Image: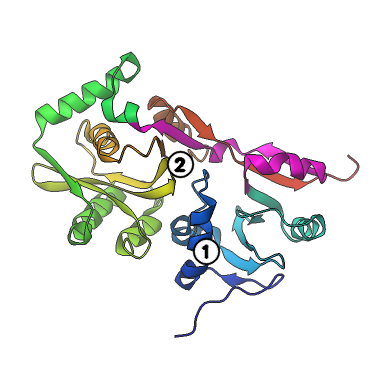
Amino acid sequence: MTSFTIPLYPDFTALEAGARPILHPRFWALRPSISEFTFANIYLFRGVHAYKLSLLPEGNPVIAGIDGGESFFMLPFALPGEALLKELFNAFSFMKCVPEHYVEALKKYGYSVAEDRANFDYLYSREELSSLSGRKFHKKKNLVNFFTWRYEHGEVPLTDERIGDALSVLEAWRAAQDGPGDYVAAKEALERCDELQLCGGIYYVDGKPAAYILGEELNSETFVIHFEKGVSGVKGLLQFVNQSFASILPPRYRLINREQDLGEDGLRHSKESWMPVGQVKKYRAIKMPAGL
């Protein structure tokens, strides 16, 4: 089997599973706070963003793609020199997922940098979500109490022998949606769970699979949840799932990253209702308009 290689810039190649041995150790060493910066995330959403890879002369990969018909690039590992950075901004419409610690350097080079609010990640206290104590979680706690009183329920780790049950949950979730959402990525995540080193839990109601959570360690104190799916019509199910999963995560995970709201009002309201303790800011950078 031919090993995967990343071509030198300005040549690019499509993102494939074979890139994992190259990219995963780099992401792991980065210990990022941004949810996109894991191999599993960029691989599973490679179709959505048309991700492609190139290796910069300085040795770090650049990830490029397309959103809304506009080309973008991401530099998870480091900013290159000023001349190469200028080449990238000339070749692409904008720079995406700019970490906060890049902002001042980019401004110094003359680029326009703005908050990308729709892509901010939401951070939650694992301890708070596991207990749901206090007045601010009163409604969530009531729903959990109703669920545990009303339904026979159980939860187990999402192991290989449970993948079929999780897929049945995903299909039920898809059937209840107006559009595909992240169905394709969620399905592949389940099918390649071991390969991508994802882990999670599956939840049963009255003996039938009803919900699951799937994610991975993002950094030493943060677990990121990439997918959370559940069947409809079970009051309090997702509130129970959230509390249950937070309660079984190891204490070393102080935070849970539940990713972004994508600018959708309903999703934003839902994420804010869980009382985040912070957000991971991401920025978008473009060339300064001529004449400014």
**Identity of the amino acid at label 2?**
Glu
Residue furthest to the right in view is: 291
Q: Which mark is residue 259?
A: 2
Residue 163, located in which quarter of the rendered image?
bottom left
- Which one is nearer the viewer's eye here, 81 or 90? 81
Is residue 1 on the magenta stretch? no
x then y, percent, for residue 145: 17, 24
In the rendered view, tell whether residue 163 sits above or below residue 17: above
Q: At 68% from the left edge and 73% from the top edge, which residue is drawn?
A: 8
Q: Are marks 2 and 1 in contact (CB under 8 Å)?
A: no
Whether residue 70 is visible here, answered yes or no, is no
Image location of residue 106, percent across then percent down: 75, 45
How many numbered discs sit on the rendered protein? 2
Label 2 – label 1 distance at C-alpha: 21 Å
* Left or right: 97 as drawn, with respect to 112: left
Q: Is residue 113 magenta?
A: yes
Residue 140 visible here: yes
**Position above or below: 269 against 75:** above
Where is mark 1, residue-wise?
23
Instruction: Identify the magenta region.
Output: 97-126
Q: Position of residue 85 (x, y in %)?
A: 76, 56
From the viewer's side, name the closer residue of 99 and 239.
99
Residue 111 falls left or right of residue 242: right
Image side of residue 60 versus residue 84, left or right: left
Looking at the image, tell me whether mark 2 or mark 1 is earlier in sequence order.
Answer: 1
